[in-house]
Image (spheres, rainbow, N blue to C red):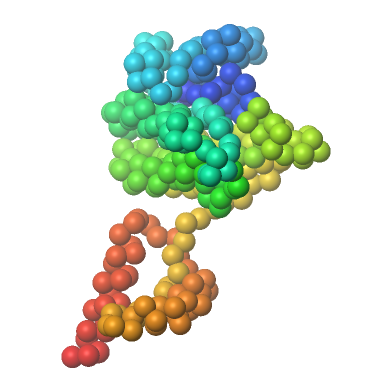
Amino acid sequence: MMLRDRVAIVTGAGAGLGRCHALELARQGARVVVNDLDAEQAAAVASRIRAEGGSALPAAGSVTDAAQVAAMVQRAMTEWGRIDILVNNAGILRDKSFAKMDLDDFRLVLDVHLMGSVICTKAVWDIMRAQQYGRVVMTTSSSGLYGNFGQSNYGSAKMALVGLMQTLALEGDKYGIRVNCLAPTAATQMTDGVLSPEALQRLAPELVSPGLVALVGTDAPTRAILCAGGGHFARAHVTLTQGVQLGGGPDAAQRVVEAWADIGDREREIVPDYGFTQAERELQGSATVERRSA
């Protein structure tokens, strides 16, 4: 039981992936706050956890409602005195091609996935800083990492969560807070009709949750993007190629076009430790050219 006595909040945990996450965390010893818009579903999952010998509280409410989130967090603190793990799982789909999508559907998906995760994380951040321990997981997606037809709103939100994770991992490091992303593929209500019935049979949501446990344990990584589905696990990285120092001048645009293959050469690409790595490399390249010209 790798998570014995840890306190976890799982959003969107009334069904699908969130339900599997909550059950698996409880099996690993965590006390779980089961959040969902549907109060009956949240209560059912919490009841199952208790029936299996675990500890759980149902918490109905929307992740986009800061007051409801604050009440959920306060209830967990009153009951258990700490919050160790937050799994930002709640989400919705409003799939259409960009040409047919209206702005309300774009905003709604960003509000639930991105701002819902922001609101929930903000609600527990000071608690985790004070206790010098925390584990936060953002649910990203291959649709955000690599794109998917008809999901411009969903993909935008999911890639934004990667950026949020990258920065919060840096800011939380000295407080013992580790922040990661999980990119799941699973047969849930959100993927019904997207994948074939045969594929869905092999993508049971409970096959994703062991990867979640790896992201929230004592020895969890930070700034990791874990892709999980069907019992297969892989890591995604945001990389930076070595690039080419071309300088400026009236023909600079033409030289960029001509050097495109070298600019994108992945042989010595890196995973930057922080965003300013790009600027540091650019300044170093520029300084090297100036020294050679002197």
**Residue 6 placement (x, y as % from top left):** 47, 24
- The residue that appears at 49% across and 72% down in the rendered structure is 264
Describe residue 167's horizontal placement relative to residue 106 as left or right: left
287 lies above or below 36: below
Describe residue 126's horizontal placement relative to residue 188 as left or right: left
Q: In which quarter of the image is the N terminus?
A: top right
- The residue that appears at 59% across and 48% down in the rendered structure is 148
91 lies above or below 231: above
Q: Quadrant of the C terminus?
A: bottom left
**Residue 92 placement (x, y as % from top left):** 54, 29
**Residue 247 placement (x, y as % from top left):** 30, 80
Residue reaching furthest to the front: 100
Q: Nearer the viewer, residue 175 or 198?
A: 198
Residue 104 in view in this figure: yes
Quarter of the image for residue 38 reads: top right
30 lies above or below 107: above
- The residue that appears at 33% across and 84% down in the rendered structure is 251
**Residue 115 placement (x, y as % from top left):** 39, 32
- The residue that appears at 29% across and 83% down in the rendered structure is 250
Quarter of the image for residue 72 reads: top left
